[in-house]
């Protein structure tokens, strides 16, 4: 028994209770709608943490931009000594209060929440009892079904293909946003490898499409919902935050 089991059981009762309320109004769409609404509710509760993380990231970005001329001087000074360049760059950022990993702590504390929700939609049993969420259906396809289970039924295949198409569209949106962000970020010589890695990272969103081919349908609905929420949330939070003030450089 995991220490997260009580949270998983509580989440299970919340989703099944929501489903029982929605089924009379939505019929067979009720269970799937309950998954979508529950996922959105969880993300809404985490919004303040994500907003704080993005605010910290914007502050760090402004700080790095303000210090770019100083970093360029250090790069010229220590062009033949990468270790010294790294040490002095880190020290420059530290003196000016520019965090190297802004918002990371706020992201880490959310991991248990996502683990609970994920386990809710993949575990055949919850708290020692059968997970009835996975026996519900969406257009005749069991929410516990995998893509490999429906390859003989064109109608059931269509349900998965629609979901895969949605995930592919969301992945493309996410990848374009990541590439656009990488293209406008100030890049110095020592940051070129990181910029190249950012381009590779832009391919990672398509992993959700691959995941949906092996995960239960319920999990794929969760992935699609949380991905869409993330993209909309990031777009909203990416706007400039008035509270963030430019950093006045302190010379190294």
Image (cartoon, rainbow, N blue to C red):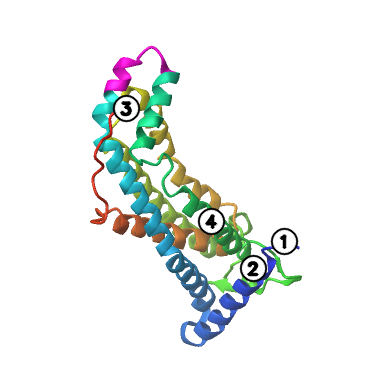
Gap between marks 3 and 2, in whole Å? Answer: 50 Å
Which of the two labelled residues, at mark 1 and mark 4, occupies the earlier sequence position? 1
Q: Which quarter of the rendered picture does the C terminus lie within?
A: top left
Gap between marks 3 and 4, in whole Å? Answer: 34 Å
SS for dot 3:
loop
Gap between marks 1 and 3, in whole Å? Answer: 49 Å
Which of the two labelled residues, at mark 1 and mark 3, occupies the earlier sequence position? 1
Which of the two labelled residues, at mark 4 and mark 2, occupies the earlier sequence position? 2
**Residue 206 in sight here:** yes
- The image shows a total of numbered marks equal to 4
Instruction: Read off the magenta span.
Output: 73-82
Q: In this rendered view, identify the residue nearer to me: 186 or 82.
A: 82
Look at 52% across and 70% down and name the residue there.
35
Secondary structure mostly taken by the magenta-highlighted segment of the chain: helix
Check whether the beta carbons of the residues at disc 4 and disc 2 lie within 8 A of each other: no
Q: Which one is in front in this view, the residue at disc 1 or the one at disc 3?
A: 3
Give me the disc on residue 8: 2
Asked if residue 55 is positioned above or below residue 142 in the image, the reply reads above
Q: Which one is in front in this view, the residue at disc 1 or the one at disc 4?
A: 4
Check whether the beta carbons of the residues at disc 1 and disc 2 lie within 8 A of each other: yes
Residue that label 1 marks: 2
Q: Which one is in front in this view, the residue at disc 3 or the one at disc 2?
A: 3
Does the magenta portion include 117?
A: no
């Amino acid at each position: 028994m995991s220490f997260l089991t009580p949270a998983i059981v509580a989440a299970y009762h919340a989703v099944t209770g929501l489903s029982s309320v929605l089924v009379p109004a939505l019929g067979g769409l009720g269970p799937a709608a309950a998954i979508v609404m529950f996922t959105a509710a969880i993300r809404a509760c985490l919004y303040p943490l994500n907003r704080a993380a993005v605010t910290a990231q914007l502050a760090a970005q402004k700080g790095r931009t303000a210090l770019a001329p100083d970093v360029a001087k250090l790069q010229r000074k220590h062009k033949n000594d990468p270790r010294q360049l790294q040490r002095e760059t880190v020290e420059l950022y530290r003196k000016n209060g520019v965090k190297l990993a802004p918002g990371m702590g706020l992201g880490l504390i959310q991991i248990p929440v996502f683990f609970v929700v994920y386990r809710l939609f993949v575990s055949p049993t919850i708290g020692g009892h059968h997970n009835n969420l996975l026996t519900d259906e969406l257009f005749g396809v069991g929410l516990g079904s995998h893509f490999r289970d429906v390859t003989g039924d064109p109608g059931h295949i269509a349900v998965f293909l629609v979901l895969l198409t949605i995930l592919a569209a969301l992945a493309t949106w996410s990848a374009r946003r990541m590439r656009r962000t990488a293209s406008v970020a100030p890049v110095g010589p020592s940051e070129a490898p990181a910029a190249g890695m950012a381009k590779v990272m832009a391919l990672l969103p398509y992993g959700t499409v691959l995941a949906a081919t092996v995960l239960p349908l319920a999990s794929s609905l969760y992935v699609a919902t949380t991905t869409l929420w993330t993209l909309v949330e990031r777009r909203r939070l990416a706007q400039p935050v008035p509270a963030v003030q430019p950093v006045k450089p302190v010379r190294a």
